[in-house]
Amino acid sequence: MDYLRIWADESGETHLEEVTMSRTVRPSEPGTVELRLSDALTVDRLQFLEAVAVEQVPDWHCAPRRQLVVWLDGWVRITTSDGDSRLLPAGSVVLAEDVVGAGHVTEHESGVRRILQIPLDPDRPASSTSARLTR
């Protein structure tokens, strides 16, 4: 699993970064497929969310906390203050850790979108670049 990271630099400018997680191949059991596992992540909780994106006017905002966001259906467009923008399909994973700075804009495909929010360990500092998931 790879993910898109949203982060803010020291001056508050936000950026997007493609991140590849390391994987360990586990022997599969008879009758199952090969498993490729990432390192375990410490999470705070998992929340299911429905975003009602009928008449939306996307605006700049920061992430409310350091969290993984998984779009279960529909597309999403994320734009950062440095001008970078990505159109992501359903199933995309984003690490939102721009809890300070200029923030980002999130535009959802119209309709009721189903999303998973997975806040990460609340004891880790949100602005620390050393807290990246690539360990």
Image (cartoon, rainbow, N blue to C red):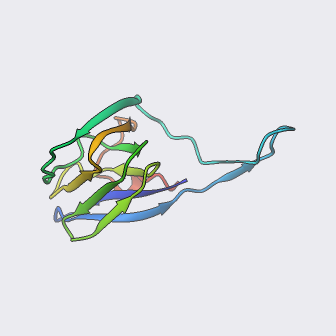
Instruction: Name the foreground residue: 78 vs 11.
Output: 78
Horizontally, residue 58 falls left or right of residue 8, namely: left
> Residue 59, percent across and down?
13, 52
At 41% from the left and 30% from the top, the residue drawn is 46
Instruction: Name the foreground residue: 88 vs 135.
Output: 88
> Residue 133, percent across and down?
47, 51
- The quadrant holding residue 43 is top left
At 31% from the left and 33% from the top, the residue drawn is 50
- In the image as oriented, which residue stretches furthest toward the right? 30
> Residue 122, percent across and down?
34, 35
At 77% from the left and 45% from the top, the residue drawn is 33
Classify 119 as above or below 108. Answer: above
Q: Is residue 8 visible?
A: no
Classify 42 as above or below 75. Answer: above
**Number of marks:** 0
Classify 85 as above or below 38. Answer: below
- In the image as oriented, which residue stretches furthest toward the bottom? 83
Horizontally, residue 7 falls left or right of residue 17, namely: left
Q: Is residue 88 visible?
A: yes
At 60% from the left and 48% from the top, the residue drawn is 38
Instruction: Name the foreground residue: 72 vs 38.
Output: 72
Instruction: Name the foreground residue: 71 vs 37.
Output: 71
> Residue 115, percent across and down?
37, 38
